[in-house]
């Protein structure tokens, strides 16, 4: 690769054979007599399943199996998908709801697997999927990434999987307390709180507490707050707001971030 720094680009070597028709895919090397599977997926974002009838699909030509969550459970299969449980900032465990391989009782997103059709050919599996009778009582969909809204998993109140953090909140609070005292002391003409907007972004500080600290500064003391993605409330309060715009960056010349310079 020849360059220095982290995150070096790795040149792709597979594209030529894909573009010239020489690529090999699993479907090209399937053994003779291999069966084909198609997953029937939820057509709605969230709802309680009121009907799931796969009887016609099971009778279709070439079908070897049509499996639902109930079939997996009846066979003694563990239906739970694996997942990592993250510890909350208070030391408790994050949410760990059951996430079944195939939907059970309700669906929670468009495309959630509901049934698996196994057939002699791919087309037979697709045709059988069209025979599945599915209906659900629609529930309000959760369409954003913010906490709150329609509950998706009861085990995750407010739709929050976990409350995770990094860094040292106590150190951030102590640093701002010192800056607040400096602003109120009258001993300083200028107080710079470098990258404080990052601390605000990750909720290490409350924006109302920062504004209260700014309100308490003595006359003649100028406060400068830096960092990306400033809170709207802080921008509204500030007398001057600037935005950094890239004019030239060595990254575009192939120079990556360097330890001791960029991080």
Image (cartoon, rainbow, N blue to C red):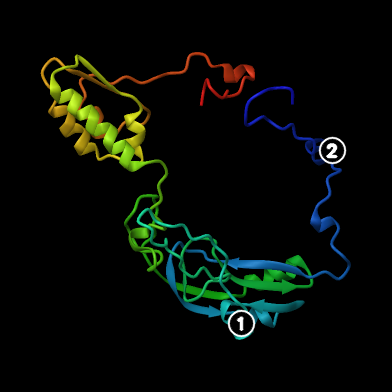
Check residue 100 in the rendering and tell me which mark sits there, or answer none.
none
Relative to 124, does residue 197 appear above or below in the rendering? above
Q: Which residue in the protein does label 2 denote?
A: 20
Q: Percent position (x, y) of residue 14?
A: 79, 39
How far apart in space, not on screen, are marks 1 and 2 (Cα)? 44 Å
Classify mark 2: residues with Cα within 10 Å, few (<14), some (14-19) or many (20+): few
Q: Secondary structure at mark 2?
A: loop
Q: Percent position (x, y) of residue 139?
A: 37, 66
Residue 9 vs residue 239: left or right? Answer: right
State the residue at coordinates (13%, 28%): 215
201 or 147, nearer to the observer = 201
Relative to 13, does residue 23 appear above or below in the rendering? below
Relative to 47, does residue 160 appear above or below in the rendering? above
State the residue at coordinates (80%, 41%): 18
Residue 227 vs residue 233: left or right? Answer: right
Q: Nearer the viewer, mark 1 or mark 2?
A: 1
Check residue 71 in the rendering and tell me which mark sits there, or answer none.
1
Which residue is outermost to the left?
Answer: 219
Q: Percent position (x, y) of residue 255?
A: 62, 19
């Amino acid at each position: 690769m020849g360059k220095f720094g982290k995150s070096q680009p790795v040149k792709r070597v597979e594209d030529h054979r894909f573009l010239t028709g020489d690529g090999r895919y699993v479907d090209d090397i399937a053994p003779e007599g291999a069966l084909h599977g198609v997953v029937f997926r939820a057509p709605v974002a969230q709802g309680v399943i009121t009907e799931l009838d796969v009887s016609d699909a099971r009778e279709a030509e070439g079908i070897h199996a049509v499996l639902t969550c109930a079939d997996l459970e009846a066979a003694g299969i563990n239906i739970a998908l694996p997942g990592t449980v993250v510890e909350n900032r208070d030391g408790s465990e994050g949410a760990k709801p059951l996430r079944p391989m195939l939907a059970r009782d309700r669906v929670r997103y468009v495309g959630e697997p509901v049934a698996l059709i196994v057939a002699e050919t791919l087309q037979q599996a697709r045709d059988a999927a069209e025979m599945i009778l599915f209906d659900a009582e629609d529930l309000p969909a959760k369409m954003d990434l913010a906490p709150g809204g329609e509950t998706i998993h009861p085990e995750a109140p407010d739709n929050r999987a976990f409350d995770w953090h990094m860094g040292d909140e106590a150190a951030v609070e102590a640093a701002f307390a010192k800056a607040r005292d400096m602003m109120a002391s009258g001993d300083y003409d200028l107080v710079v709180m470098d990258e404080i907007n990052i601390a605000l972004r990750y909720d290490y500080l409350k924006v109302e507490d920062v504004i209260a600290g700014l309100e308490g500064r003595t006359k003649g003391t100028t406060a400068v707050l830096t960092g990306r993605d400033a809170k709207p409330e802080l921008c509204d309060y500030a007398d001057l707001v600037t935005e950094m715009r890239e004019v030239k960056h060595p990254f575009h010349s192939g120079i990556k971030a360097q330890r001791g310079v960029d991080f």
